[in-house]
């Protein structure tokens, strides 16, 4: 496992698409070349880290409708 310094005090932000039920991901800015991501429902839980290119591809895929909402 790789430790990312400063994640304990990172400035996490929630997606503007986050619902009232706190059902979204949060990302931390300020880490050049990487994007730390966590589940907003479990802020003390694990953090996934993507490189900036992978994050951009993921966001582009969402905008293109490549990840339809789960039925629930």
Image (cartoon, rainbow, N blue to C red):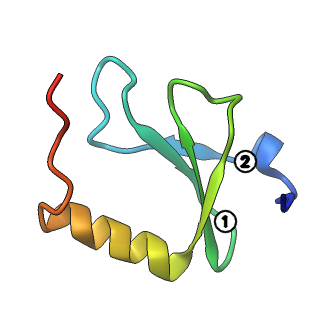
Quadrant of res 24: top left
Residue at point 59%, 26% (across, down): 42
Q: Are marks 1 and 2 in contact (CB under 8 Å)?
A: yes
Q: Position of residue 61 (x, y in %)?
A: 24, 69
Residue at label 2?
Answer: 10
State left or right for residue 52 relative to residue 24: right
Residue at label 1?
Answer: 30
Quarter the C terminus occupies: top left
Q: Position of residue 68 (x, y in %)?
A: 14, 49
Nearest to the observer: residue 67 or residue 59: 67
CA neighbours of label 2 inside 10 A, class few (<14), some (14 to 19), many (20+): some
- State the count of labels: 2
State left or right for residue 43 relative to residue 20: right
Q: Is residue 24 above or below residue 53?
A: above
Q: CA distance from mark 1 to mark 2?
A: 8 Å
Q: Is residue 68 above or below residue 65?
A: above
Q: Is residue 28 above or below residue 39?
A: below
Quarter the N terminus occupies: bottom right
Q: Secondary structure at mark 2?
A: loop
Q: Secondary structure at mark 1?
A: loop
Nearest to the observer: residue 7 or residue 61: 61
Residue at point 57%, 43% (across, down): 38
Q: Position of residue 20 (x, y in %)?
A: 29, 19
Residue at point 50%, 43% (across, down): 26
Q: Is residue 7 above or below residue 44?
A: below
Quadrant of res 66: bottom left
Q: Position of residue 22 (x, y in %)?
A: 39, 23
State left or right for residue 33 relative to residue 58: right
């Amino acid at each position: 496992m790789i430790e990312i310094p400063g994640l304990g005090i990172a400035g996490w932000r929630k997606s503007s698409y986050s619902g009232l039920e706190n059902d979204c991901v949060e990302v931390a800015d300020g880490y050049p070349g990487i994007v730390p991501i966590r589940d907003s429902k479990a802020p003390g839980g694990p953090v996934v880290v993507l490189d900036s290119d992978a994050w951009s591809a993921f966001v582009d895929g969402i905008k293109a409708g490549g990840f339809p909402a789960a039925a629930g």
